[in-house]
Image (tube, rainbow, N blue to C red):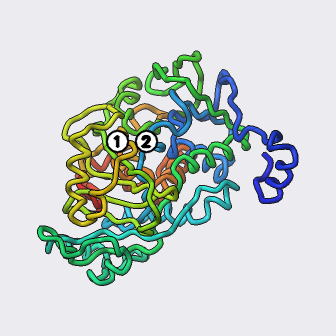
Amino acid sequence: MKRYSAFAIARQALSHHQGWERAWRSPQPKRKYDVIIVGAGGHGLATAYYLGKNFGITNVAVIEKGWLGGGNTGRNTTIIRSNYLQDPSAAIYEKARSLYETLSQELNYNIMFSPRGVIMLAQTQSEIRGYQRTAHANALQGVQTEWITPARVKELCPIMNIDGPRYPVLGGLWQARGGTARHDAVAWGYARACSDMGMDIIQQCEVTGVRREGAKVVGVETTKGAIDCDKLGMVVAGHAGVLADMAGFKLPVESIALQALVSEPIKPCMDVVVMANTVHGYLSQSDKGEMVIGGGTDGFNNYTQRGSFHHIEETVRALVETFPMLSRLKMLRQWGGIVDMTGDRSAIISKTPVEGVFVNCGWGTGGFKAIPGSGWAMAELIAKGAPGPLAEAFTMERFKRGQFIDESVAAGVAH
C-alpha cells in the first residue's frame, strides 16, 4: 500500500492523478478463511483490522451484501462522545474516543476527526440531576466532562436561544474532547488497512445461510457460493436478528428506523455538537455548512431507510424553539438507518449458542461513536474465544442474570 502524503499528491499532479492505486482490492472469495466477518460497516471493518493488528490473524474475509459502508455507517450523524453513566459503557466509548483521536495517523487516511466538543442540554430539573450525576460518575471513570452553566452554554453556542418559553436551557454536560468524524472515511480507512494486510473485502455478496456441523459453525452460504470458516463474526447492526435466525438462535433485539436530515449549506455558525433530550433532537454543522439534524426512532419495528415526513415535522418543530434560525432553512435531504435495540439500550458483544459464532450488535442509536472500541473488543473476543475487559459486561448472559447496563438516560436522546 502506497502511503498518502502531501508529496504523493504533488507527484500524482504531474501525471494528472492517473497513477493512484485502488484503495482496497475487490477479490473473489476463497474456499476457506480462518475468520469470516459478516458486515463491512465500521464495526465489521474495525473488527477485522484489530484482528490483524492486535492478534496477527489476517486470513479474514469481510462480507457485505451491498457496498462497503452503505448501511448505518453511511447513515448516521457522526457524533463521537464517551460521557456515559455506567462504568462498562464509559470504558468502551472512551476507548473508542481515544482511538479516534489518532486514527487518521494510524490508518494513513484522513477520517476528518473534529474534537469540537459535545454539549448535552439540561432543560428540566430532572435532567440537571441526571447530568450532574453523570459528571460525577465520569470523574470517577477518568472521562473528562464537566457541568456548565447556561451562560457558558450560550458562550459555546451563540445561535442558541437559552430562554425558551417552554424549555429554557438550565445548564449542560460538556465534553470538550468529543466531536465528529467523517463517517464514510472511517469505513474507507479501515478497509484500506485491512486490504493491505491481505484480508479480502467481498462486496455485493449476501449471506443466505449459516452452515453448521452439530453445534459448531463450518461456513456460510452466499450469493457467490459456499465459503468455509473456523470462526464467524456477525456484525450487521439492524439485521443481526435475521442472521441469528439463520444460525439457529434468537437475539434479544428489535430493529427500528432512526431518521435524520440535513439543511441546505450555510455559512459557519456553530462549531460544537448539541444534544437536547427534552425537545428530542440533536444538531451540528458539517464541514460543508449543512446543519445535521437527528431525532428519535420510529415508534414501530421496521426496516425502512427512506425517512418520513412526520419525523421531519416532529424533530424540526422541537428544535426550532432552542434554535430559531432553523425555521428559515430549507431541507436538503433526509434518510433513515436501521438500528438494533436491546432492552437495556446497551450493546451485545458475545459468544453465541453456536460454537465459533460471535455477535456484535445492539448499539442502537450510538453505534458510530463506538466503532474503534467495538472493533477492538470484538477482535479480542474472536481471537481468544472469551471476552476481554472491554466486552465482559456486554455478553448475552447479562439478560439471564439480570445484570443490565441501563443507558436509557445517558444515551442523550430517548430511544
For the question of whether residue 332 can be seen, the reply is yes
On screen, 67 above or below 396? above
What residue occupies the far front of the structure in this picture?
Answer: 328
On screen, 47 above or below 210? below
Lower sequence index among marks 1 and 2:
2
Residue 391 falls in image quadrant = bottom left
Residue 47 locus on image (x, y percent): 55, 46
Considering depth in this image, is 161 or 120 the residue closer to the camera?
161
- What residue is at 76 percent from the left and 53 percent from the top? 4
- What residue is at 41 percent from the left and 68 percent from the top? 270
- What residue is at 64 percent from the left and 36 percent from the top? 60
The quadrant in which the N terminus is found is top right
Considering depth in this image, is 308 or 383 the residue closer to the camera?
308
On screen, 160 above or below 228? below
Residue 274 falls in image quadrant = bottom left
Label 2: element kind: helix
* Residue that mark 1 sits on: 339
Q: Residues within 10 Å of mark 1 (few under 14, many from 20)?
A: many
Q: Is residue 180 left or right of residue 256?
A: right
Residue 305 falls in image quadrant = top left
Considering depth in this image, is 215 or 344 the residue closer to the camera?
344
Asked if labels 2 and 1 touch by Cβ distance under 8 angstroms, the answer is yes
Residue 219 locus on image (x, y percent): 54, 24
* Residue that mark 2 sits on: 72
Residue 289 locus on image (x, y percent): 47, 58
How far apart are the two marked residues, 1 and 2, measured between alpha carbons? 8 Å
Residue 56 locus on image (x, y percent): 69, 47
- What residue is at 63 percent from the left and 43 percent from the top? 191
Q: Amino acid at mark 2?
A: Asn
Q: Amino acid at mark 1?
A: Val
Q: Is residue 357 left or right of residue 394?
A: right
Label 1: element kind: strand
